[in-house]
Amino acid sequence: MAAAKKAATASQPTVTLKQISAELAEKSDMTKKQWNELTDSLVSAIVKNLKKGNRIRMAGLGILQVRKRAARMGRNPATGETIKIPAKKKVAFRAAKELKEAVGA
């Protein structure tokens, strides 16, 4: 299973925010530097709101929110020893219907 996941990831190219900013700069009147600053500000605003516990709804894209994971018991796969996994928070993303339809998921 893990090998299949690695193979799928290796064949897919990764697009960075800087590359997206450059693409948007070509299509608009703004420079790459202005788009980079804009995307950096967007990411900062998203992180700030997630830290506060707010949900972020991006129309056509989806919803980002912080979810709490309860503490639970797990098992060390190497030794079989039972271990306690502490409670923690995770960022969850739920794709919007439009995104699912566009991707074909």
Image (spheres, grey):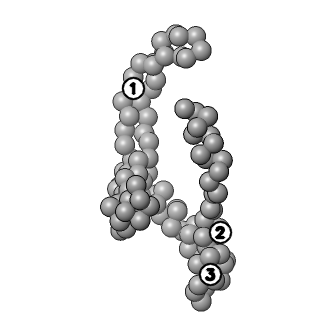
Amino acid found under the numbered disc labelled 3? Ala
Quadrant holding the N terminus? top right
The mark closer to the camera, 1 or 2, is 2
Query: Which label is found at residue 71?
Result: 1
Q: Is residue 53 above or below residue 37?
A: above
Disc 1 element: loop
Label 3 and label 2: CA atoms lie apart by: 10 Å
Mark 1 or mark 3: name the one nearer the start of the chain. 3
Q: Position of residue 23 (x, y in %)?
A: 62, 76
Direction bottom: furthest residue: 29
Q: Residues within 10 Å of mark 1 (few under 14, many from 20)?
A: few
Q: Specify few, some or many for label 2: CA neighbours under 10 Å numbering under 14, 14-19, or 20 or more.
A: few
Residue picked out by circle 3: 25
Residue 61, quarter of the rendered image: bottom left
Q: Residue 95 appears in which quarter of the rendering? A: bottom left
Residue type (three-letter) at the residue carrying disc 2: Gln
Answer whether labels 1 and 3 touch (C-beta < 8 Å). no
Q: Is residue 60 above or below residue 6?
A: below
Q: Is residue 58 visible?
A: no
Q: Which residue is at a point 42% across and 39% down the rendered structure image?
A: 89
Residue positioned most to the left: 97
- Report helix, strand or loop for mark 3: helix
Say if 91 sits above or below 21 in the image. above
From the viewer's perspective, tell me whether residue 56 is left or right of residue 16: left
| Residue marked by disc 2 | 19
Asked which quadrant contains residue 58, the reply is: bottom left
- Viewer can see residue 16: yes
Q: Residue at x 60, y 70 (%)?
A: 20
Residue 77 in the image: above or below residue 56: above
